[in-house]
């Protein structure tokens, strides 16, 4: 077993509840000794962390104060007292927001290794973010070839994944909205959006009507409010609205005024349906089967903003809420470079799902 004597661990706690937009003062970095694994557990040094809008929702009540937070993370086993986890193995688990975690084999998922797919992808297009986009398109919208699509928060993690996946699924015109002219340009030049607009530039209904003058079949709604109202106006008869999230609401204590045109849902026979990705974990392998060949061929590129250093995890989280990311916001530890090198050096024989008790 590796010795960790003298090493220190850092854990982020939430210390107070925010009213409106959170600040660094709502968090504390708590230092402790690196925990020792008990029999049947293993110590994982975390390498990549996901910071997500749902963490903001949890800050209002579900996150206990002065306690470690939860979040998706990828780490390397550095000491093990269970035969089911070998030192050096790379695993996914949910004890994020901390440098080290003690896990049981049941709490982790071993990641399948695919040639040419970097570790960070398991938090972006192949992680909960990509799975959300995949479920939105295949199970809720049931997107058909040639259908026209509108995506809000289009430059974020789910938004970029939605466009990448929809394009290879044969979508028609893909329109997106985002929070700056630079993001709009990026969406059109690099992510494959046919049209995009900055939602700050006027009433969303007008901007969307101009961007999609012939109407739309599907709206993937990451935002809610005015943009949802705009989409209801622009959708064609039998259009579908996929309610993914309401990021326009999370930092605003006032309820959103829009949508005010729900009667149109009846008039146009629209279908509006929400879902939670945690109820669709059984589709993880299907996502790998669908997306990995397109990543390997270069048809799907990775959209990620990677922030270096665990000490910047709160900064990255708050930056994501302010829209400082394009693609999935990910935090990377300084130790991740070595792990990523080792991951990337896998020989041809190492491709495909790993075998063993935790492969799933
Ligand atoms: N249903 C599920 O299971 C599930 C799973 C994952 C995520 N989600 C939801 O999906 C959405 C996107 O999540 P993500 O992880 O991909 O985050 P993200 O889009 O990468 O990051 C959040 C983005 O929201 C945008 N934003 C912030 N305030 C806004 C406002 N007032 N109006 C419009 N846009 C605003 C920002 O971009 P701009 O610069 O463009 O403003 C920011 O980049 C969220 O609503 C999240 O809760 C749902």
Image (cartoon, rainbow, N blue to C red):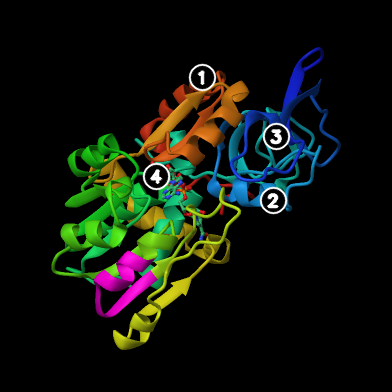
**Which residue is outermost to the top?**
6
Precedes in sequence: disc 2 or disc 3: 3
| Badge 4 density bin: few <14, some 14–19, many ≥20, Cα 10 Å | many
Is 110 situated left or right of 283 in this image?
right
In the displayed structure image, the side of residue 131 where residue 79 appears, left or right: right
Q: Quadrant of residue 326?
A: top left
Whole-percent x and y of residue 158? Answer: 41, 51
Q: Position of residue 113 (x, y in %)?
A: 45, 40
Crowd band around label 3 with a 10 angstrom C-alpha radius: few (<14), some (14–19), many (20+): some
Q: Circle 2 sits on which residue? A: 60
The reply to whether the C-beta atoms of the residues labelled 4 and 1 are less than 8 Å apart is no
User: How far apart are the alpha carbons under marks 2 and 3?
Assistant: 11 Å
Q: CA distance from mark 3 to mark 1?
A: 32 Å
Residue 9 visible to an observer of this rendering? yes
Give coordinates of residue 240: x percent, y percent: 34, 74
Disc 2 secondary structure class:
loop
Q: Which mark is residue 156?
A: 4
Distance, label 2 to label 4, CA atoms, is 23 Å
7 in relation to 220, above or below: above
Dot 3: element = helix
Q: Quadrant of residue 227?
A: bottom left
Is 33 colored magenta in this rendering?
A: no
The residue under label 3 is 26
Q: Which quarter of the rendering shows the N terminus?
A: top right
> Tags 2 and 3 in contact by the CB under 8 Å rule?
no
Residue to which mark 1 is pinned: 338
> Magenta residues?
229-241
């Amino acid at each position: 077993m590796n010795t960790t004597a003298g090493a220190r661990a850092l854990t982020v706690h939430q210390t107070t509840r925010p009213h409106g937009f959170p600040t660094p003062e709502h968090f504390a970095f708590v230092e402790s000794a690196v925990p020792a694994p008990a029999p049947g557990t293993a110590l994982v040094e975390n390498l990549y962390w996901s910071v997500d809008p749902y963490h903001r929702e949890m800050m209002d009540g579900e996150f206990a104060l002065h306690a470690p937070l939860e979040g998706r993370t990828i780490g390397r086993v550095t000491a093990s007292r269970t035969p089911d986890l070998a030192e050096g193995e790379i695993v996914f688990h949910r004890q994020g927001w901390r440098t080290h975690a003690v896990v049981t084999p049941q709490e982790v998922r071993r990641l399948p290794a695919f040639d040419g797919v970097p570790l960070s992808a398991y938090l972006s297009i192949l992680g909960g973010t990509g799975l959300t986009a995949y479920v939105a398109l295949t199970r809720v919208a049931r997107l058909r070839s040639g259908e026209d699509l509108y995506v809000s928060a289009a430059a974020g993690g789910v938004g970029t994944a939605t466009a990448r996946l929809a394009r290879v699924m044969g979508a028609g015109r893909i329109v997106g909205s985002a929070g700056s002219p630079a993001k709009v340009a990026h969406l059109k030049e690099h992510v494959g959006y046919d049209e995009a607009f900055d939602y700050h530039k006027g009433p969303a209904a007008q901007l969307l009507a101009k961007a999609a003058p012939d109407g739309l079949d599907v709206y993937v709604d990451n935002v809610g409010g005015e943009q949802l109202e705009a989409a209801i106006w622009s959708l064609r008869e039998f259009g579908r609205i996929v309610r993914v999230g309401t990021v326009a609401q999370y930092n605003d204590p006032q309820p959103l005024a829009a949508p005010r045109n729900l009667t149109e849902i009846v008039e146009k026979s629209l279908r509006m349906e929400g879902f939670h990705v945690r109820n669709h974990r059984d589709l993880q392998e299907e996502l790998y089967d669908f997306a990995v060949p397109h990543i390997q061929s270069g048809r799907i590129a990775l959209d990620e903003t990677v922030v270096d250093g665990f000490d910047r995890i709160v900064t990255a989280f708050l930056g994501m809420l302010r829209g400082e990311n394009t693609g999935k916001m990910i935090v990377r530890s300084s130790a991740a470079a070595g792990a990523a090198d080792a991951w990337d050096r896998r020989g041809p024989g190492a491709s495909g799902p790993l075998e063993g008790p935790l492969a799933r």
